[in-house]
Amino acid sequence: MSQWRFLDSPSAPISIQMAEDDRLFEEFLSNTDTLPLLKICRVNEPGVTVGYSYKTKKEPGSFWGCFLQKGARLLRKEQICIRPTGGGLVEHGNDLIYSVIARRESYPAFHQVRTSYLSFHEAVQEALLSLGFATQLMRCDDPRVRKGMAGRVPSQRRTNSCFTDPVATDVLYRDQKIAGGAQRRKGSNFLHQGSI
């Protein structure tokens, strides 16, 4: 495996963490000599993120639908912002957030989207096992697996929340999702954001 950079980002509001990931990804795209990056961070106050594709949708499951659903959070001064990656709604506050910025060539499993998700979630699973937590990965054939937002009408979705609507390879502990991720790809480059 090639050399990597590591960034232990100071605790900050979720909007700052997401903006930093977006900036780091854009810098990575503009410089082909930049080493892949693993960033670890936490937020210093509760907040909510939704995937970037939600900002243009008009149905009830859209960013604006989520915004209205979660409007009470604004009264509690929780931030709601759009992630630079895809996916649904994620509540942040007690989670550990990690971001990986790399190229497909950085590691063999990164060549395909599905295998890259699997490799990240297997690494999370291995780390949790080293701490004494035996987890499982959500199987593709599990009836609870959400097949993705594309091709499903809003009434078929159980919820907009990523942690109540698991997808294949998400990490489960005691039958509850505890870790997942989302990606954005441009050419052979990608940003993977995960929450544990």
Image (cartoon, grey):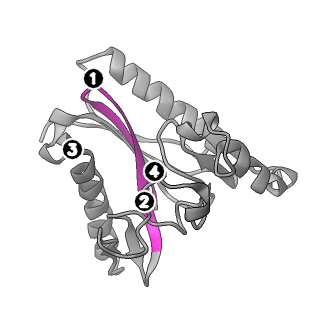
Task: Give percent across and percent down for residue 73.
Answer: 79, 55
Task: Give percent across and percent down for residue 22.
Answer: 49, 30
Q: For mark 1, what is the residue?
A: 34
Residue 3 seen by the camera: no
Q: For mark 4, what is the residue?
A: 151
The first of marks 1 and 2 along the sequence is: 1
In whole angstroms, how far apart are the C-alphas of marks 2 and 3? Answer: 17 Å
Q: Which residues are magenta?
A: 177-195
Residue at (35, 15) in percent of width and height? 30
Tag 4: residue type? Gly
Q: Is residue 89 magenta?
A: no
Say left or right for 195 vs 6: right
Which type of secondary structure does the marked residue at label 1 adopt? loop
The first of marks 2 and 4 along the sequence is: 4
Res. 180 mark: 2
Q: Is residue 191 magenta?
A: yes
Residue at (87, 53) in percent of width and height? 75
Which residue occupies the foreground of this view, 170 or 168?
Answer: 168
Which type of secondary structure does the marked residue at label 2 adopt? strand
Would you identify the image quadrant in which residue 83 lies?
Answer: top right
Say left or right for 10 vs 33: right
Above or below, comparing residue 173 to residue 151 in the picture: below
The first of marks 1 and 3 along the sequence is: 1
Task: Give percent across and percent down for residue 11.
Answer: 59, 46
In whole angstroms, how far apart are the C-alphas of marks 2 and 4? Answer: 21 Å
Tag 2: residue type? Gly
Residue at (21, 43) in percent of width and height? 110
The first of marks 1 and 4 along the sequence is: 1
Residue at (29, 72) in percent of width and height? 141
Tag 1: residue type? Thr
Task: Give percent across and percent down for residue 56.
Answer: 62, 33
Residue 12 seen by the camera: yes
